[in-house]
Amino acid sequence: MNLLLKAKLIFICIFSVFSSLLEAQDTLILIDREPKLISTYRIENDQVLYVPFEKKKERIIEIDKVYSVRSSSKSELIIYKQDSLENNYLNAEQMADYILGQRDARIAYGKQATKSGAGGFVLGFIGAATGIYYGPIFIIGYTAWKGASKPKYKTEFGFDKKFAKNPFYKEGFGTMAKRLVSRRSALGSATGFLFGIGTLALVLQ
């Protein structure tokens, strides 16, 4: 058995073990946040105390930010409760659709968000020419403009057409899509601005 074949077998074994470990973990399904793999959890008062996967330190999250705990056996404990005082106006089924929309946007809307980030880089670079006082206006303005732009509800960006008439799924998708665009726009324009400042400093030396 040659070395290359041995290396491939070792990689496959490691990957298989790691995949099995992931499948054996529970998942904390959060509202407006990415799901978290967890080793253990407990509920005390209005908080969920959990230990993230492969971590030792226990962390705390407010219970109104948690939808459910999905076990490795695929059963699900719904923690979420409709409560208008906590701005949780949706019932459990509606919130599930909202979270599904967010998940789909998180998975596939990245390409569109990346385009916004690239545009921000160019604008930030140009803004650097106006100096450190006026340049940040380009960053703030561009980020605000992209954040206020209407999301693209298209299949190529992850939108599931069978939920086209579901307002809760659509709201979740749109919320996450706008968040991704805003973050990458801000990062892209800030990076472009700093890169522009650095380039100008070198040129003017």
Image (cartoon, helix red, strand yellow):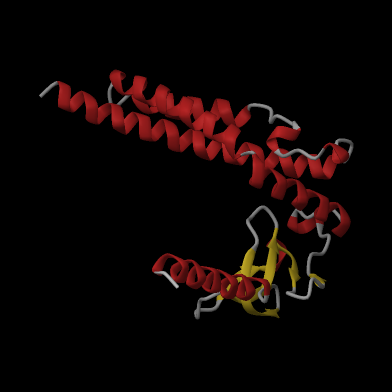
| Image-quadrant location for residue 76 | bottom right
Q: Residue at x 30, y 31 (%)?
A: 195
Q: In this view, does 22 lie to the left or right of 6?
A: right
Q: In this view, does 170 lie to the left or right of 10?
A: right
Q: Residue at x 37, y 35 (%)?
A: 191
| Image-quadrant location for residue 188 | top left
Give the x, y percent position of residue 75: 82, 73
| Image-quadrant location for residue 16 | bottom right
Q: Can residue 89 be seen in this view?
A: no
Q: The N terminus appears in which quarter of the rendering?
A: bottom left
- Please say if 12 is above or below 176: below
Give the x, y percent position of residue 108: 65, 41
Q: Residue at x 64, y 26 (%)?
A: 149
Q: Which residue is drawn at 26% across and 28% down?
A: 197
Q: The C terminus appears in which quarter of the rendering?
A: top left
The residue most toward the front is 1
User: Which of these two is toward me, 202 or 149?
Assistant: 202
Give the x, y percent position of residue 117: 49, 32
User: Which of these two is toward me, 23 or 169?
Assistant: 23
- Please say if 43 is above or below 139: below
Q: How many labels does the image show?
A: 0
Q: Can residue 7 be seen in this view?
A: yes
Give the x, y percent position of residue 189: 42, 30
Q: In this view, does 83 lie to the left or right of 104?
A: right
